[in-house]
Amino acid sequence: MLANRFALIALIGLVGSPVAAATVSATVATQGPSTGGCSQSENVGVSVSATCAPVFVVTPLYSVGGSADARASFGSIGVRATATTITPDFIGGGSYFDAIATSWMDDALSFSIETGSIVIPVDFAGGIDIITDERDTSRATVNLSGVVGGQFISIFDYYFYDNAVQSSTGSLGVTNVVVPIVNGRAGVFFSLEARALANMFDESSESTIRIDFFSSARLLAAQVFDADGNRVDSAFIGSDSGFDYLRGVVPHGPAPVPLPATGLILATGVVSLVALRKKFPAA
């Protein structure tokens, strides 16, 4: 069975809590027999990256390899992880390769209004390719989450944990994340993690997992609303990072349709579910 969980959530009316300082971080790690371990973490600057370079080792009992990449800047974070394990003959054991990539951004925004909301469109898309004939050992996970107004949200959550031979791709489009403004401040935190674990346990088999969300997620042009739901973009003063949230970054595809100036009700505490487009082509 291939299990998939996709959640696109816009939260409204939460209690705000500003962060201490603007930070971005990129962390990667890989591990496998005969390949040694790799780990790298970068969190200094406005744009960071970390890489565990591709490695592949062939032995008489197994072949393993993979890589991991992560990048983070204010307004855009991305990860990529690959893992392959081949065990042509089962002789008393199996093999594995594990690759993990994580990136995140943490920022605080200032406004000239005391209360209201800033609506940040999050553009997210990528691909997950899986080829494995081993049962219940290999796995692939991708999670895009955030903390807005002191509350955790799950924007994208995917896991694979079973035997299959197939390829799958998730294309999410744009999700509106509504961040409350409290006392003229709003805190935002977005985190993206990918893990590719190719694990052969008890038989001759092959597992290859490729996860590529390196161009995601992107924060598009935001809009500011006061407590009555009126659009007031002029109320945005700036961010601790210096990133212009009203300008945002370039989307993956065509620019999304702008939100109506008075279309959002920002203080109702309603949780909205946004539709997801997904496809699972056969291998």
Image: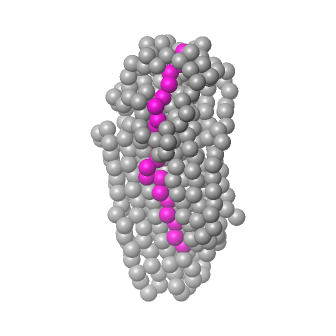
Left or right relative to 141: residue 104: left
Please say which color scheme the image uses.
one colour
Q: Is residue 142 above or below residue 30?
A: above
Residue at x-position 67% and y-position 31%? 271
Is 234 on the left or on the right of 125, as rendered? left
Tell me the quadrant of the picture where the C terminus can be found: bottom right
Characterize the magenta stretch by its predominant secondary structure: strand
- Residue 90 belongs to magenta span: no
Residue in the foreground of this view, choosing between 22 and 126: 126
Which quadrant of the view contains residue 130?
Answer: bottom right
Tell me which residue sits at (58%, 53%) in the image.
170
- Is the residue 171 above or below the residue 73 in the image? below
Coordinates of residue 222 in the picture (x, y in percent):
48, 28
Q: Provide the residue span drawn in magenta.
A: 207-226
**What x and y, as percent, mark residue 136?**
64, 68
Residue 121 in view here: yes
